[in-house]
Image (spheres, rainbow, N blue to C red):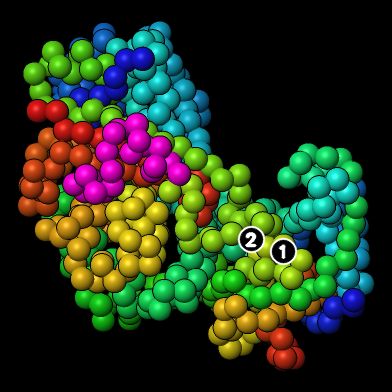
Amino acid sequence: MKGVTILGAAALPVGKWQTPANAERHVLEHETLAKLVIDAVEDAGVDKNDISSLVFSLPRPYTQQKYFATFMANYLRLPCSGSVAEIMGNGMTAGLAFETAANDIRLGRSRVALALGINFETATSAAEHMMSSMRATGDVDFHVPFGFTPISWYAMDAARYIHEFQSSRKQLASVAIKNRHHASLNPIAQFRKPITLEEILAQSPIVDPLGLYEVPPRSDGAVCLVLAEEDVSRASKRPYVRVRGRGFFHEGAHQISEVPNDMIALVSAAKAGHEAFVEAGIAASNVDFAELYAPCTIVEVLVSEALGLVPRGHGARLAEEGQTALGGRIPICTSGGLQSRGHPAYVTPFYSFVEVMDQLRGRAGQRQVSNAQIAVTSAELGNYNAALVHVLEAVR
Amino acid sequence: MTLSLIKMDRPRSYPPRQTEFTQHFWGVLNEGRFETTRCDDCGRPSFPPKPFCPHCWSRNVAWIELSGRGKLYAQTVVHAAPSVFRDEAPYRVGIVDLEEGVRIATRIVSEETPELDHPVEIVVLNYTDGPLFAARPVGDRRKP
């Protein structure tokens, strides 16, 4: 198998970009993403003719242009011998698109593959959007009739964590303060004004015990990543990122199964993380920073524990002590995370790789983790019923 | 065992669909019984009820009645609701571990914040268009 590297990246600042259906002038997905393709390919220094795979995250149903991947192959005039496809996997969508592109390189089908996508959704209200998303995070006949929403499952994780580990909403909220501070240093973050604990606790409740600043915002975003076989990256003489380990696990449950388990152990994250660390030949203690898929404050705590970055039951306390902040023992979500960098869900895992590219190439400016060599990322779906974990390494 | 019935003066906001198979579950629920399927081969229950065993993939399953007694594993209150539930919000939902070793997710009928790991019982919410099940802390007889 060929080694996979990431050689280039370009990302749209996360925010509200989508125009309403009746707008006189539109911001459209294909134009927005095509600009990023040109930028990312220039960042990588590869030739257009070297690219032979285009793997997209599925756009939201609000995107009018259907068969987006094949439309874009024409828009970019890019014949491909590897893959042209749109990938879907709920919150893990962009992680699986990344993996599909990486597999083309592993199998020798492409020397350069683009993993890319755009998530435009903010012109649709949250209440209407949830009419769709509630059917993605529950059994339509045995969960949805009760009114569960996607983040209501994380809220129940929070209730359980507070109950089992004598934690508190205030302790968990320290994650949101930390992430906003990180976002204040990230030019592509959606929310960059620092916030205080008092401000967090004063926000309107969303799903108890979590309020507006402890859950993800609605966001639009778009990313293009340039993946390359290691020979290509080495020859480029540019700094790049090597995929050193990868793990995946689906626990065979959709939010919950009827078999009682320890819901907040996030067994999929633990198993996927272990597999990724073994393949990379490292331990969790070797990780310099982590960019985790964590929609709510509680989820960041739970996945950092499941990956072994912090001890079980101590994640919230260590976050409160600043150990997961920039300058702390293990910086987590240096981009600002999903609460503050933003959460355009179908491309969110792409943004994790963008942050890793910034950090591991020494381009993260004021939020640079000093001497960053090894990073870990995660993507998930449901209530971390499945997890995809990557270990990435700087090559300079 | 017959479950407590709570009359609701409105239709369900998002009615579950019924199949030839699951109509039994909803039919007996309407009469105050909480049933699911259990495998005749490996003995394990499943929920929701299924025409096969998800654990061993046997087709030999039978309906069993559940006691309706359990413990509250987790709960939350949904304030920001999908549009179809907006006039019900805020409302309480949770996860319940039934004494038969079956975990379910459902509406929680309780005005106060219920204690986790404390006993709850399954009740039937009789809406004008059909039933839903819910759980309420044991001893709490107030209406939702």
CB within 8 Å, label 1 to label 2: yes
Q: Is residue A339 above or below residue B7?
A: above
Quarter assignment of residue B84? bottom right
Q: Is residue A286 magenta?
A: yes
Question: Around disc 2, counting alpha carbons within 10 Å, would you say few (fewer than 14), some (14 to 19), or many (20 or more)?
Answer: some
Q: Which residues are magenta?
A: A271-290
Q: Residue at position x 34%, y 31% from top?
A: A279
Q: Residue at position x 12%, y 49% from top?
A: A369
Quarter assignment of residue B121? bottom right
- Residue at mark 1: B101
Of the residues shown, which amino acid type is indicated by label 1?
Gly
- Residue B100 seen in this snapshot: yes
- Residue A38 seen in this snapshot: no
Q: Position of residue A204 (x, y in %)?
A: 40, 77
Q: Residue at position x 22%, y 60% from top?
A: A324
Q: Is residue A156 magenta?
A: no
CA gap between label 1 and label 2 equals: 7 Å
Nearer to me, A191 or B57: B57
Q: Secondary structure at mark 1?
A: loop
- The quadrant of the rendering that contains the C terminus of chain A is top left
On the picture, is A104 further left or further right than A362? right
Of the residues shown, which amino acid type is indicated by label 2?
Pro
Nearer to me, A230 or B6: A230
- The quadrant of the rendering that contains the N terminus of chain A is top left
Q: Is residue A341 above or below residue A206?
A: above
- Residue at mark 2: A260
Nearer to me, A296 or A124: A296
Q: Position of residue B113 (x, y in %)?
A: 55, 85
- Give the main secondary structure, helix, strand or loop, of the magenta stretch: helix
Count how many numbered circles sit on residues in the image. Answer: 2
